Structures are given as C-alpha cells and as structure tokens.
Amino acid sequence: MTTEIRKHADSLPCPEVSQNTVIIASFLITGCTRYANEEELTTLDETQAAVESSDKKVEDLKQEKAELEQTLADKKVELEEVKAEKERVESKL
C-alpha cells in the first residue's frame, strides 16, 4: 500500500511535500480505526463457526456424493452383467 501511495505522490507536482503529506495522512487514517467491541467479536466468532460448520457439511456431502456415484457405477456394471446373463439364458431356450 505504501508503494502505491509513493507512486501516486511521485506523480504530483511537488513530490517531497506531497509524499510526506500522503504518508502522514495514511498513518492518521489507519491510526484512527476503532477496535471491535464484545458484541462484534461474538458475532465474528459465531459467523466463523457457522462458516466452518458449513465447510464441513460441504465436505461431508461431497464424500457422500462420491460414495453414491461409486455405488451407482457398481450397480450399472451389475445390471449389464445381469442383462448379458438374461440374453444368454434366453438364447438357450
């Protein structure tokens, strides 16, 4: 961020004064940030827990989907084998 400020300050007509002014202003702006209160921290913690829970649920569902897809593939193979067996039996009749 400081590099961006310096690049912008260097493009101004009087870089020495402007650069210092921009740097001081950036410290004042960042120095004036307020800290989160307890309610905001609690909300943040709850939100973070909800995100982690959702991420775990997504992973669990992906695993379940993969297992179901494998079961489906196995059943399709089994179906083809049964169809082939049926045709073989019908051809002997």
Image (cartoon, rainbow, N blue to C red):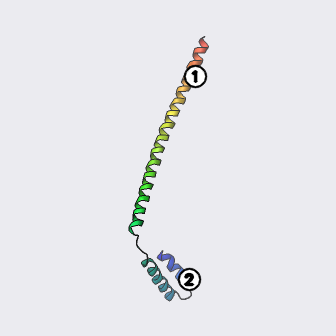
At x 52% / y 82%, what residue is drawn? Answer: 9
In this figure, which residue is indicated by the disc labeled 2?
A: 11
Element type at marker 2? loop
Q: How far from the left and from the top, in percent, is residue 38? A: 38, 67
Neighbor class of circle 2 (other Cα within 10 Å; few <14, some 14-19, many 20+) is: few
Disc 1 and disc 2 in contact, CB within 8 angstroms: no
Q: Is residue 47 left or right of residue 83?
A: left
Q: Which mark is residue 34?
A: none
Up the image or down, 9 lies above or below 44; here it is below
At x 43% / y 78%, what residue is drawn? Answer: 32
Q: Is residue 92 left or right of residue 49?
A: right
In this rendered view, identify the residue nearer to me: 34 or 85.
34
In this rendered view, identify the residue nearer to me: 61 or 74.
61
Which amino acid type is shown beneath numbered disc 1? Lys
What whole-number distance in Å separates the C-alpha atoms at marks 1 and 2?
78 Å
Earlier in the chain: of badge 1 and badge 2, it is 2
Element type at marker 1? helix
Q: Nearer the viewer, mark 1 or mark 2?
A: 1
In this figure, which residue is indicated by the disc labeled 1?
A: 83
Which amino acid type is shown beneath numbered disc 2? Ser
Q: How far from the left and from the top, in percent, is residue 88? A: 58, 16
Q: How far from the left and from the top, in percent, is residue 67? A: 47, 38
At x 41% / y 58%, what residue is drawn? Answer: 46
